[in-house]
Image: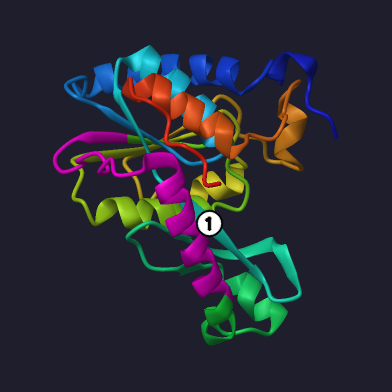
Amino acid sequence: MWPPEEERFADRTAAGRMLGTAVAAHLRQFDLTHRPLVLALPRGGVPVGHAVAQAIRADFDLMIARKIGLPWQSDHGVGAIAENGPPVFDRSALACAGLTTSDLAPAVQRERVELRRRQERYRGSRPPAEVTGRAVVLVDDGLATGVTARAAIRALQTGKPAHVVFAAPVCAAESVDLLTGDVDAVIDIHSPRDFHALGLYYADFAPVTDADVADVCAMAWGAVKVPAPV
């Protein structure tokens, strides 16, 4: 079912601006406006996160994560990994599929290789931003099952941030419920109980490419883009 027209965003950047207003209000409420950091989840979360960072005058960086799919249907995510973090699995989905975490070891290894490729492509030699003691806002373009967000949160928490917010323009309500114990706040614009597909909430939901991510990072970091591999 399509959401009402007034609940649809023009594109990811427009959604990020609206989300940034809500995030800014949260940071002011809890006196967290000193040196906030936005970590965007590539690829789709990058234009959203950049708009949020501009709205709250925050530093901008990435939290790279990858879904772990079923052996016979790789686009059906039953787990995820994020840089410097352990794999996180949807245990109920694994049980329904008759799988154990050991069965997914080859998929985990493949996604670790892709994580490293993306780290090199997006960051080059630039070190990740320091998160210790900071208010960190983890941003994506939406929250569906929540497994990728949980992996990113787990990885982020190893750096001991002072306050963690997960923010996305659209979050499935049941997934918000799953995240509330893992972060200090979940911020969204819409949290439908009858969530079907993220793309329905965007008039323009064109795929975000590696080149798009590199462009945003170069803009945010004031640096020359990392050249694509030949």
Q: Is residue 166 left or right of residue 164?
A: right
Pick the front one: 113 or 201? 113
Q: Residue at 61% of width from left, 53% of height from top?
A: 145
Determine if residue 178 is in view.
Answer: no
Q: Secondary structure at mark 1?
A: strand
Whether residue 22 appears in magenta in the rendering, the answer is no
Q: Is residue 42 left or right of residue 163?
A: right
Q: Residue at 18% of width from left, 40% of height from top?
A: 162
Pick the front one: 37 or 184? 37
Q: How many numbered badges does the structure rendering display? A: 1
Farthest residue in the right direction? 1
Magenta segment, which residues? 107-136
Determine if residue 7 is in view.
Answer: yes
* Residue 150 percent location from the top left of the image: 45, 55
Q: Residue at 31% of width from left, 50% of height from top?
A: 156
Residue that mark 1 sits on: 66
Residue 91 in the image: above or below residue 120: below
